[in-house]
Image (tube, rainbow, N blue to C red):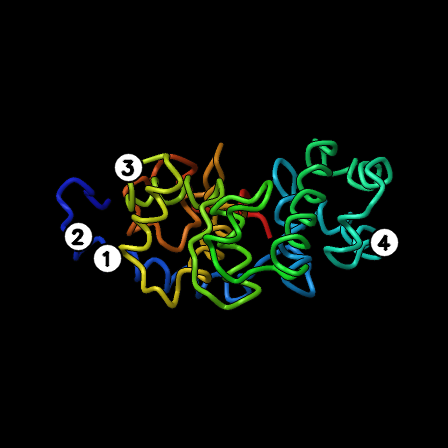
Amino acid sequence: MVQVEAESPLARTRRARRVDRLLGERYPDARCELDFRNAFELLVATVLSAQTTDVRVNLTTPELFSRYPDAEALAAADPTVLEEILRPTGFFRAKARSVQGLSVALVERFGGEVPARLADLVTLPGVGRKTANVVLGNAFGIPGITTDTHVLRLSKRLGYTASDDPLVVEKDLQAVLPRRDWTMASHRLIFHGRRTCHARKAACGACPVARLCPSFGVGEVDPLKAAGLVKP
């Protein structure tokens, strides 16, 4: 097992890049699992994904974007109708306010277009660095680290960071991964967190990076039992 305390920054960087390569081999189809056709749809879908699953959001957004295909339309939506559409995603009143508020801001400050700068995106209601980096990386091709719950958990388990602060974790990951890989490395960590390195019972015995992980043993180590924990 890797001893993080004795690991040099160079060794950590090399290990992190090897882990990313191995995760790439395990999850060649890693990607953003939210359905979207443009930056506006991705921005709204990402805001809606808080406290619910991407699957649930993907079931909700077709009706949403059929009624309100752009920022202008969503900004002018009847709040009661909008809330009813978003009800299945949970916290629907707050989410309705957020997506309508960010739409109003897009219309008033950015001509209805989603800006391609993090500094602009985080000024929108309900949009933080995590959401901004999702949009930048997947809609605009601008590399960014997505510090969702899986990335935060795995970054600590893998010994890339000792912090729970998303901004610190983002910087620690930026330090060990090439900038060009930030978006895809985030997807690979998220896929791994959803499918193998679970929060409650990690499938350590079926993990492709077990030998490189300082937290090996936090979950099931028996290969057969671990394989049964892996989600397709």
Q: Residue at x 64, y 55 (%)?
A: 34
SS at circle 3: loop
- Determine the CA span between mark 4 and mark 2: 51 Å
* Label 3 with label 2: CB-CB less than 8 Å: no
What is the C-alpha distance between the residues marked 1 and 3? 15 Å
Q: Position of residue 100 (x, y in %)?
A: 72, 44
> How dense is the environment of label 4, judged by Cα within 10 Å: few (below 14), some, or many (20 and up)?
some
How far across and down, in percent of the image, does residue 129 sit? 47, 47
Numbered disc 4: secondary structure: helix
| Pointers 4 and 2 in contact (C-beta within 8 Å) | no
Q: Which mark is residue 67?
A: 4
Which element carries disc 2, helix, strand or loop? helix
State the separation of the CA atoms marked 3 and 4.
Answer: 45 Å
Residue wearing tag 2: 9
Earlier in the chain: of badge 3 and badge 2, it is 2
Under mark 1, the amino acid is Thr
Q: Nearer the viewer, residue 161 or 106?
A: 106
Q: On the picture, is 65 further left or further right than 160?
A: right
Contact (CB < 8 A) between labels 1 and 2?
Answer: yes
Residue at image coords 51%, 53%: 120
Q: Nearer the viewer, mark 4 or mark 2?
A: 4
The residue beneath circle 1 is 13
Vertical relation: 179 (above or below) 223: below
Q: Amino acid at mark 4?
A: Arg
Q: Tell me if residue 2 comes above or below residue 35 in the rendering.
A: above
